[in-house]
Image (cartoon, rainbow, N blue to C red):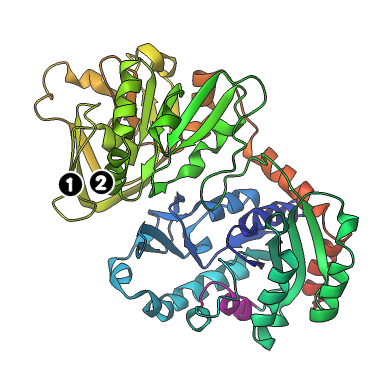
Amino acid sequence: MVLGTTSGAGKSWLATALCRYYAAQGYRVAPFKAQNMSNNARVVPTLTGQWGEIGSAQYFQALAAWARPDVRMNPVLLKPEADTRSQVVLMGQVSQALTEMPWRGRSEHVWPTIQTALDALRAENDLVVIEGAGSPAEINLQASDIVNMRVARHAQAACLLVTDIDRGGAFAHLYGTWALLPDEDRRLIRGFVLNRFRGDAALLSPAPQMLQALTGVPTVATVPMLWQHGLPEEDGIFDDRTSADGAVQTTVAVVAYPRISNLDEFQPLKNVPGVRLVWARSAAELASADWIILPGSKHTSADLRWLRERGLDQAIEAHVRAGRRVLGVCGGLQMLGEALTDPHGIDGNAPGLGLLPIVTRFEQHKVVQHAHAAFGVELEGPWQALAGVKAQGYEIHHGQTRLHPELAVSGAASCVALRSLANGQALGWHDGRAQVMGVYLHGLFEDAAVLQALFGATVPTLDGVFDRLAEHVSSSFTPAWLDGWVNGYRSGTRS
């Protein structure tokens, strides 16, 4: 199990690397995180043959382990809708009852499901790499813990505690976390990991030795900083190093509103030569952009209001008048239309930006599915390179979008930019001049055919990213510790 002294310490990153490392040794490996709080989600199979949602981190960890992702790998997903409210997804499906339940009251209701999912994965695999959440030493949460030490105790997992040494205070974080744990939980901590180290590791001495004298726990790895490792970040916006190699030819500004979702799908743009990715929160940050992307949102009407309050709507309109590209994805697509209507109280009514001749109605049923689609051959202007291109991705949305009733006349169907290959349903629209386009298909930039069409470029494959992570991390551990620990654990010595 990988625990962290804080959120953002590198738990997801380290767990992903370990999934690939052990899978490459020939073990059957699966990832697990009991409860994830994130609006970055992926569509995976449920146990009943439907589609469901899990956190993106566990999805990528499963791919790293060469395992088929499924909902057991993240049985509880919390998708924040406001500072004090989250939608609860249990085993891939939205649970309205749990969503309405007081936060502290949920734990005992979901623990049996968590336990069953973890036990099933343990029975089917040689090794389960478990990721914790936040810090296990948040003593205000320990009584209702279902994601850190309660999971570790249930599985009798050997735990690594990772800290971000680049932030400073790493040894205090490690010691303080260990010291706040009960004795039975301390015994499960087998090693400390210093992550994102820059400098001469010899200068760390004698701190690791002093820490071991205080705790009995060795520092088993010092992992050097790895910029542009190619893996999407689990929390928040990516780091500021958002340009691939080569002179910048295209600046892509992604509007980073408060309830942004599925931001991890834009990671490939960081790796495209000549592309600079900007996370924009002001009109000034949009002024020099060649592209503006309105990404997904967990609360579309609220993020649209936020956008207007900051004058970003006017900046987007000016961008369109200048003949530059605008792309909306899912919630961003909905914002580009004429109106949002919400008869069921799911998201909220709001006027749209009026840049596409469409309207969106929020329905109680949530669409969660994989999708294969094709761009229309009639695409013109800036998006012409996508004409006829087939793409695959996933849909996660409550909104149902149609052409505006007053515009649904003869010839208006030419506004459709993207159609499902399964049933011909419209999944994207564009305006007559074709510089504004919106799609429901998440994962567009993860499709090699789309990247090739738009940028004439390929980016590193995920397999290559996982291999690099595994090599980088495994070479940072005390020699033979990773292999020796697993061999000892499987033989019963658990050294």
Say if residue 393 shows up in the picture: yes
Give 24 or 346, whichever is nearer the viewer. 346
What residue type is disc 1 on?
Answer: Asn
The residue under label 1 is 349
Q: Residue at x 37, y 28 (%)?
A: 327
Q: Position of residue 295 (x, y in %)?
A: 39, 38
- Tell me: 251 left or right of 482: left
Q: Quadrant of residue 458?
A: top right
Task: Pinpoint residue 105: horizontal percent, then vertical percent.
Answer: 37, 79
- Magenta residue span: 145-155
Instruction: State left or right for residue 273 relative to residue 23.
Output: left
Look at the picture and state if 460 lies above or below 44: above
Viewer-closest of 62 and 256? 256
- Image vertical order of residue 168 relative to residue 464, above or below: below
Q: Is residue 106 left or right of residue 72?
A: left
Q: Nearer the viewer, residue 242 or 132?
A: 242
Q: Secondary structure at mark 1?
A: loop
Q: Disc 2 on helix, strand or loop?
A: helix
Q: Using the image, tell me which numbered label, if any, was put on residue 191.
A: none
Magenta stretch: helix, strand or loop mostly: helix
Quarter of the rendering occupied by the N terminus: bottom right
Local packing at callout 2 (Cα closer than 10 Å; few below 14, some 14-19, many 20+) is many
How would you rate the neighbour count of disc 1 (Cα within 10 Å): few for under 14, some for 14-19, many for 20 or more?
Answer: some
102 lies above or below 412: below
Whether residues under marks 2 and 1 lie with C-beta atoms below 8 angstroms apart, the answer is: yes
Query: Residue 352 in the image: x percent, y percent?
Result: 22, 36
In the current view of this chain or complex, which residue is farthest to the bottom? 183
Residue 218: x and y, percent? 83, 71
Q: Residue at x 60, y 53 (%)?
A: 61
Q: What is the quadrant of residue 421 in the picture?
A: top left
Which residue matches tag 2?
301
The tag earlier along the polypeptide, 2 or 1, is 2
